[in-house]
Image: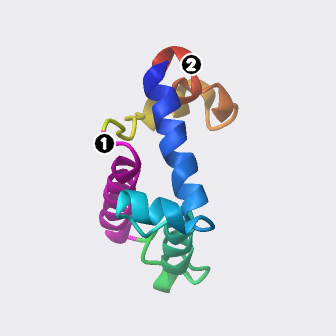
Amino acid sequence: HDDRNRFFDAAKALLDLDTDPTIAVATNWTRGLAYYVRRHFRNAVANKRSDRMHDGMGFLTQHLAITSDYERALQAMDAQVCLPYWDFTIDAARYNLSGWEQASLWDTDLW
């Protein structure tokens, strides 16, 4: 479960980066978790015609871009970390969009 701990440690470092400037100095990375949350919310708006994150072709391109950048941020905290792949279609079929917390992504055996 070392991979899992490394992942969560890197994610925690990104969370702490917003309030602890020494992390940015040590890792040479300046965008903390709040940046990615703001970026997602800024591009995902209530007006569907203006939603660049969830409407039309923007869904794939915008989510790929933010996910790729977030993975680079995690790797700035720990070079051995990567985002786990989650095939949501398997869990969506199994749980019919309810009981998501039972999804394989959250299973400790996955890590």
The majority secondary structure of the magenta stretch comes to helix
Is-magenta flag for residue 103?
Answer: no
Please tell me how crowded label 1 is: few (under 14), some (14-19), or many (20+) other residues with Cα within 10 Å: few
Q: Amino acid at mark 2?
A: Thr
Give the residue drawn at x 51%, y 14%.
Answer: 109
Q: Nearer the viewer, residue 90 or 70?
A: 70
Give the residue drawn at x 35%, y 64%.
Answer: 28
Give the residue drawn at x 31%, y 42%.
Answer: 79
Left or right of 70? Residue 105 is right
Please tell me how crowded label 2 is: few (under 14), some (14-19), or many (20+) other residues with Cα within 10 Å: few
Q: Amino acid at mark 1?
A: Ala
Q: Quadrant of residue 53 in the image? A: bottom left
Q: What residue does disc 2 label?
A: 108
Q: What residue does disc 1 label?
A: 79
Which residue lies most toward the top here? Answer: 109
Residue 17: x and y in percent read 54, 62
Is-magenta flag for residue 67?
Answer: yes
Q: Earlier in the sequence, mark 1 or mark 2?
A: 1
Residue 111 shows up from this direction: no
1 and 2 marks in contact (CB < 8 Å): no
Q: Quadrant of residue 101 in the image? A: top right
Residue 64 shows up from this direction: yes
Magenta residues span: 56-79
